[in-house]
Image (spheres, grey):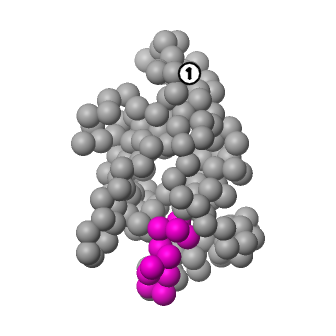
């Protein structure tokens, strides 16, 4: 399914933010999540600890705060689970900003407001996040798509300095 959205970055994650699958465009637009150990592939860990996340999201702080508020909403009914406790503990140890923002207790639903993402070749591109949710009795997963609001820009060619 994520391959079908083509050049638009998309990934599937658990309600904990664990990255389960992603398309090639997500690797190009966001990061190569395949280089992380499986237990380290988490959207919150990436957003709050990876330098490239701060590069990719022009308004990183706004997006990071929203991701934390979305996480709080996603785990509201299972907040006492060992996985949530372990993730909150690790994020609190690794990110002072997470600690501060988590203590604010913000909760957010999906947000369709356009925001700029920085692509390595296209530059800043306005996108909207679309979430497709699948929830069953045992757990929920969602497909997250970062959809350019005006279509993809014309490809400017290879990244400067890239071997080719």
Q: Is residue 51 left or right of residue 159?
A: right
Residue occupied by mark 1: 122
On the image, the x and y values in percent for residue 84 come to: 49, 78
Quarter that holds the C terminus: top left
Q: Which residue is at 44% across, 85% downward?
A: 81
The part of the image, by quadrant, that contains residue 26 is top left
Foreground: 124 or 137? 137
User: Quadrant where the N terminus lies?
Assistant: top left
| Residue 76 part of the magenta-drawn span | yes
Q: Residues within 10 Å of mark 1 (few under 14, many from 20)?
A: some
Above or below, 46 relative to 148: below
Residue stretch in magenta: 71-81
Give the answer, above or below, for where 25 lies relative to 144.
above
Residue 17: quarter of image: bottom left
Q: Height in image: 90 above or below 25?
A: below
Q: Is mark 1 on a helix, strand or loop?
A: loop
Res 144 visible = yes
What is the number of callouts on the image? 1
In this rendering, position of residue 121 left or right of residue 104 = left
Measured from the top left, where is residue 49 in percent x and y?
A: 62, 58
Q: Is residue 84 visible?
A: no
């Amino acid at each position: 399914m994520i391959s079908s959205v083509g050049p638009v970055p998309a990934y599937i994650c658990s309600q904990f933010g664990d990255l389960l699958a992603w398309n090639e465009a997500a690797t190009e637009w966001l990061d190569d999540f395949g280089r992380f150990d499986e237990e380290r592939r988490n959207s919150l860990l990436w957003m709050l600890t990876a330098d490239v996340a701060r590069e990719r999201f022009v308004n990183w702080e706004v997006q990071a705060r929203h991701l934390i508020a979305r996480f709080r909403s996603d785990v509201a009914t299972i907040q006492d689970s060992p996985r949530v406790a372990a993730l909150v503990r690790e994020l609190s140890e690794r990110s002072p900003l997470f600690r501060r923002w988590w203590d604010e207790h913000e909760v957010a639903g999906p947000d369709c407001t356009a925001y700029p993402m920085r692509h390595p070749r296209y530059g800043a591109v306005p996108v909207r996040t679309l979430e497709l949710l699948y929830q069953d009795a045992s757990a929920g997963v969602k497909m997250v798509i970062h959809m350019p609001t005006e279509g993809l820009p014309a490809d400017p060619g290879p990244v400067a300095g890239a071997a080719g």
